[in-house]
Image (tube, rainbow, N blue to C red):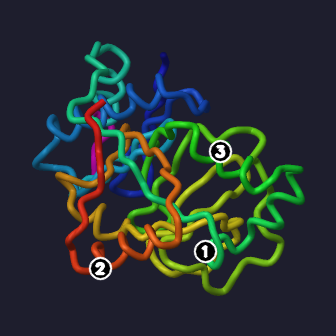
Amino acid sequence: MKVNCVKYGSHGVLLTWPAEIKEEILMEVLSFQSALQEKYAKRLAFTQNAYNSILLQFKDEPSTEDEKEIEFFVNESVLNHTLKNRQTWHIPVCYEKPYALDMPEVCLKNGLSKEEVITLHTSPTYLVYFMGFLPGFCYLGGLNEKLHIARKSIPRKITPKGAVGLGGQQTGIYPVESPGGWNIIGNTPVDMLQLNLREENGIQPGDYLKFIPVSTQEYEFIKKAADQRNYKLKSIPC
């Protein structure tokens, strides 16, 4: 598929694929991101992918020839899109009070029972497209259409750390306490920020997440262990 390459600021080059949210496109994006990181290892400050794009931020200003070389590379190269070390992460979530702050509103607006919301939310395996918004925040694909819901008209000034929410066509986890307008239906006792700071072992784009419902008692047990760094999050190689 055709990839566009344009200058982005003084030191950046932006690569864009077709404006679609598809696993096929993400796998190609991540494969080329890895290849470009290796190709320009000494010159790159950092790279960042999104649903269908890669930003290459160089330490020095890239030339027009650099842009042409990058565009030729991504459009003419054939890469193996099989990523190594992909994991499916099992994220425990408590959907009970006092953690499900907006569950009644979600049930009312979407015409669902609490049990249906939990079943619909925990059934899929969600693809991690990229990280952003907050450190450790995963942009996920795969939310059931029955759970699509508009963001809150008046955002909360404080959304609790670990809050699991619904916003538009997405679901996600607040890794830290933050203002936010998503509808909160649960909370995870896992420290998502600490998990994602461990780059070699943390959640990466291309991985999957699976939400696992737990009781309030299980939540408290896991949180105590997690706070003491005695809890290991379950993950299964893909």
Tag 2 residue = 227
Compared across the picture, whether 13 is left or right of 98 comes to: left
- Residue 138 lies, in percent from the top left, at 46, 54
- Mark 3–mark 2 distance (CA, rounded to whole Å): 28 Å
Callout 2 secondary element: helix
Going from N to C along the chain, the mark reached first, 2 or 1, is 1
**Magenta stretch contains residue 63:** yes
Q: CA distance from mark 2 to mark 1?
A: 18 Å
Q: Position of residue 108 (x, y in %)?
A: 89, 60
Helix, strand or loop under label 1: loop
Towards the viewer: 80 or 75: 80
In the rendered image, residue 41 lying in the magenta stretch gets the answer: no
Whether 209 is drawn above or below 133: the answer is above
Tell me if mark 2 has few (under 14), some (14-19) or many (20+) residues whose alpha carbon lies within 10 angstroms of its own: few
Q: Which residues are drawn in magenta?
A: 61-65
| Above or below, comparing residue 69 to residue 55 in the picture | above
Q: Which mark is residue 119?
A: 3
Where is residue 158? Give x, y as percent.
61, 85
Residue bearing mark 1: 99
Reading the chain from its start, which is encountered first: label 3 or label 1?
1
In the displayed structure image, the side of residue 41 where residue 62 appears, left or right: right
